[in-house]
């Protein structure tokens, strides 16, 4: 068998995008819980990363479980990743407004959402491009 005919699956940090998405969902859930605990916040907003991590975890798991629905489920996952990135952009508003880090825990969470949400969304897009190219090769 010719190695050039083998189509490699897209990997992020050595794992499939579906598993990477599950790990990211777990990270977000833990982040919201831990930051809320450390900061002593009783605010609903401190749990926003956790609330957004749950659907990422669930839909990523389902995309592994139901291979025939993977495309649709992973598109749902990337929408949540994009929402996380967009939510993190709010940090720039406080930075421009001159009130950055008045609530350090909230701003650290926003920076985390901005950076990880951007990276996650980018990796999902790269995965979709990779899948599209591989589909064209196999057709």
Image (cartoon, helix red, strand yellow):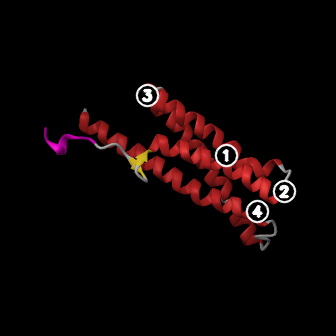
Tag 4 secondary structure: helix
Q: Mark 4 — residue?
A: 105
Is the C-beta separation of discs 3 and 1 under 8 Å?
no
Residue at mark 3 to residue at mark 1: CA–CA distance: 25 Å
* Magenta span: 1-7
Residue at mark 4 to residue at mark 3: CA–CA distance: 39 Å
- Indicate the position of residue 97 as horizontal and vertical percent values: 77, 71
Tag 1 secondary structure: helix
Mark whose residue sits in front, 3 or 2: 2
Q: Residue at x 69, y 49 (%)?
A: 49
Q: Mark 3 — residue?
A: 67
Q: Mark 2 — residue?
A: 40
Residue at mark 1 to residue at mark 2: CA–CA distance: 17 Å
Q: Residues within 10 Å of mark 2 (few under 14, many from 20)?
A: few
The mark that comes first in sequence, 4 or 2, is: 2
Q: Mark 1 — residue?
A: 29
Q: Quadrant of residue 51?
A: top right
Mark whose residue sits in front, 3 or 1: 1
The mark that comes first in sequence, 3 or 2, is: 2
Residue 55 lies in magenta, yes or no? no
Tag 2 secondary structure: loop
- 17 lies left or right of 28: left
Is the C-beta separation of discs 4 and 2 under 8 Å?
no
- Indicate the position of residue 65 as horizontal and vertical percent values: 48, 28
Q: Quadrant of residue 6?
A: top left
Most foreground residue, 35 or 91: 35
């Amino acid at each position: 068998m010719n190695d050039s005919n083998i189509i490699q699956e897209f990997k992020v940090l050595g794992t499939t995008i579906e598993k990477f998405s599950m790990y990211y969902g777990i990270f977000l859930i833990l982040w919201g819980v831990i930051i809320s605990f450390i900061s002593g916040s009783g605010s609903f907003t401190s749990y926003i990363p956790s609330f957004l991590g749950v659907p990422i975890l669930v839909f990523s798991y389902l995309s592994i479980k139901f291979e025939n629905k993977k495309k649709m489920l992973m598109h749902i996952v990337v929408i949540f990743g994009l929402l996380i990135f967009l939510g993190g952009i709010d940090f720039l508003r406080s930075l421009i407004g001159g009130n950055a880090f008045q609530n350090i825990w909230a701003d650290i969470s926003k920076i985390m959402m901005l950076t990880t949400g951007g990276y996650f969304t980018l990796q999902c897009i790269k995965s979709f491009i990779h899948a599209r190219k591989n589909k064209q090769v196999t057709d």
